[in-house]
Image (cartoon, rainbow, N blue to C red):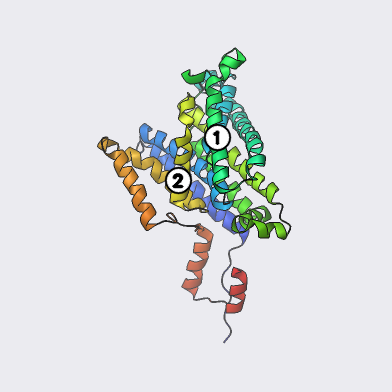
Amino acid sequence: MKTRSKIRIPMPARYVINLALVVGFYFLLTGLISSGVITNYWTGILITVGINIILAVSLNIATGYLGQLPLGHAGFMAVGAYAGGIFMKATPAAALLKEGNNAALIPYILAAIVISAVVAGIFGIIIGIPALRLRGDYLAIITLGFGEIIRVVLTNIDSVLGFDFTYGAAGLKRIPKFSSVTLVFICVVLSCFFIHTMMKSKHGRAILSIRDNEIASESVGVNTTYYKTMAFVFSAMLAGIAGCLYAGYLGSLYPSTFKFMKSIEILVMVVLGGMGSMLGSILSATVLTILPELLRSFSDYRMVVYSLALVVMMIFRPKGLLGSYDFSLSRSLETFLNRLLGRTENPKKEAADNE
């Protein structure tokens, strides 16, 4: 008996479906904010959620996809935050914000984000080329040292330069507060899109092959040094963008914010969500940002409950919330339509497609 082939949604249609989902979610979110259902306090929490999502998915490139263990992600965030904050202070952005001239503010915001990404990327190259020749614990120690060096430099560089640049431990203040829900949402969507596109390309397959077996990858001609550095730099650039948004949200920066524990906090988000799962990083960043706020009424015990929740999660789900699984709306829609119409496919062809 001849079987009918399964329905396959073409790639352009997949992008249209995902775009429609993103746009629909954005209008729902902004509608809830404008109607007052989501208060100003929770709007600020949502901005923090978006920043943490960018940090988590960016670190997931180096840990989940590349298989390395960097512990200096807060350093790249700090570099991007200070680069964007110093630039915005030097522009008329504060006056434009006061006037409500958002259209004239856009070029300065875009320039700040680009500058933060480029500066963080340069530091990623400087650290990545020598550090990525090492593996495991040695790489973790080097990147940990880098993060601490950045924090110390930001604290003491003014005394070396002889003028106020980062304002040391007193903090960089009066940064124009340009980060909004819309800006952070766009940055989150673009970050996830670029990561997804990269990992589906030949570059992404090369990165995954290095994670699975670096020696075998080298033997078949994969330039492991190039791809490891590329992934590390891309991860650093996204962390720099998150830092820029963080500066534009708080309006002040302190070197003490970017201590070693900040890097551990980001790493926990990745591990909890599942190494190599972008959706898992998004969910864990959301949960770990909102959960402490929900437990704020239990101020004496909230950190105990928070810690216990992480311990229980790691006991019963050691591979994280989703493991390495990534949800695909178009793939789920394909499965639903094929089951609804009762369509099957030649088992040999289906097996070949899944290889």
Q: Residue at x 27, y 35 (%)?
A: 299
Q: Quadrant of residue 217?
A: bottom right
The residue that disc 2 covers is 269
Is disc 2 placed on a helix, strand or loop? helix
Depth check: give the residue in front, 342 or 71: 71
Q: Where is 340 relative to 220, above or below? A: below
Is disc 1 placed on a helix, strand or loop? helix
Residue 121 lies, in percent from the top left, at 63, 36
Instruction: Decide if residue 318 is on the left or right side of residue 109.
Output: left
Q: Residue at x 58, y 75 (%)?
A: 5
* Residue most extreme to the bottom: 1
* Residue most extreme to the front: 138
Q: Which residue type does callout 1 highlight? A: Gly
Circle nearer the N terminus (2, 1) = 1
Residue 273 lies, in percent from the top left, at 45, 51
Residue 101 seen in the figure: no
Q: Where is 74 relative to 4, above or below? A: above
The residue that disc 1 covers is 145
Q: Where is 302 relative to 217, above or below? A: above
Q: Quadrant of residue 140?
A: top right
Residue 335 lies, in percent from the top left, at 50, 67
